[in-house]
Image (tube, rainbow, N blue to C red):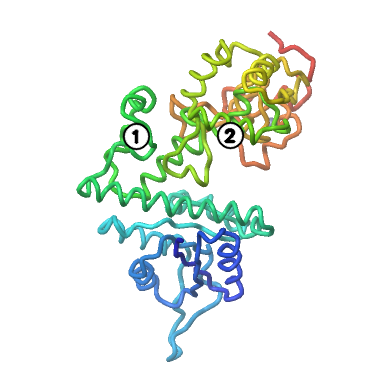
Amino acid sequence: MFKGVFIDDKEEEKKYAELLTNNSSGQLNIEFRLPEHEVTELAGHLIDQHYDFAAIDFRLDEVPIKDAEGGGQKNKYRASALAQQIRDRAIDQPNCDLPLILLSQEDYIKRIFHADLTAEDLFDLVISKEELVSPQPLALAASRIASMATAYKTIHASYTKNNNNPVAPNIHLELDSHEAEMVLNHQAIRAIAKIQYPHQIVAKVMALLIRRPGILLSDEHLLARLGVSPDSPNIPQLKAKLFDFKLGYSGLLCEGWPRWWWHRLDAWSKETLGASLGSLAGSERVAKLSNALQIELKPAISKWSKSSDEYFWVACSSCDHPTELKHSVLGYDANYQPFLEPSRICWYCIQTGAYESRDLVIDDSDESLAEKIRNGKIQPQTQMPS
Ligand SMILES: [Zn+2]
């Protein structure tokens, strides 16, 4: 069990510490604390308590907390100032580094937090309080917090084992050195071997492997690659079989963010289906897959062409549905790396405007194409003007 703390200036918000604890299947025990000290002092207390993680509300300064002698307000700081103090302490003592979770109201996260890129880098995980209204999102948030805490412990242990030196990225990702040479030999990934601090390793693994498809695939991208509809029957059985074939990722953060190795899936499908996935239309992939695994599966249907005979490749960044390169535009990603699969937004989400509410931006190179979809110059069943 992981011992954590939730800091908020409003006593009634204590309920979030209890809700997460109670929905964590016994993995978390979260205490509640008011920001009763000056920022440096509070950061020191949190480090000294050896918590496995700290969750912090964005606004810590709205309800003034004064000392007993009636002095001035002590909590004149926000989450980012407290997080910065904790990260500064970790520079001197990497073994004190701990996961920091921003647990706050949605509008603060959207309006203020995401506008401050420095603040964004300080937190491992952002959870909005509004999400935590029912058991399912609570259990997901709790499992992600536990996964973060596990990742930090794993990194600390790998240091200790390596005489307090950083270790090669394949150790964190649970890949043997032969496979690593084939898959992880990219400058941005090799750089992880020089990082000293757990929070920086976690941030890199998140940005380069977990949050973006390429080397690893999320469940949504896995289904797109296989051409399987997200509402297909037997998806749990399909995943269980693929896991038995050792296509599942078991490295850092795998508990909170299930992922699949693309290079293993690619090799496995060539061997098992007799063709590379990209050379088969979705309907053909699913027929071969159903036959090979003896489970009934439903092929994906393009939201644009309404056909299963499309070459599905990625999950749309907006709707998560399998989409084909032909009927999607490039999404803008400031942190793109050549070994990643670029973000794509399906034409359907462009037409409906749904992508805008997901804070996605179209890459300049595809903006004129997107405009033709928006203004109806390109419509379903219309061929692209050549
Ligand atoms: Zn979409």
- Residue closer to the observer: 274 or 30: 274
Instruction: Find the residue positioned furthest to the front.
Output: 294
Please indicate whether residue 119 sits to the left or right of residue 197 in the image: right
**Exactly how many numbered labels are in the figure?**
2
**Vertical side of 233 occupied by 227: above or below:** above
Query: Can you give x and y, in whole percent of width and height, for residue 177 in the image?
Result: 31, 28
Q: Amino acid at mark 1?
A: Asn
Instruction: Find the residue positioned furthest to the bottom.
Output: 69
**Separation (CA) of disc 1 from disc 2:** 24 Å
Query: Can you give x and y, in whole percent of width and height, for residue 360 in the image?
Result: 61, 37
**Vertical side of 221 occupied by 125: above or below:** below
Kindly identify the residue that appears in the image at 66 percent across and 33 percent down: 235
Query: Can you give x and y, in whole percent of width and height, for residue 36 in the image?
Result: 45, 78
Quarter-of-image position of residue 90 = bottom left
Please indicate whether residue 3 sits to the left or right of residue 160 in the image: right
Residue ID for mark 1: 170
In terms of image quarters, where does ligand 1 lie? top right
Mark sitting on residue 240: 2
Q: Is mark 1 within 8 Å of ligand 1?
A: no
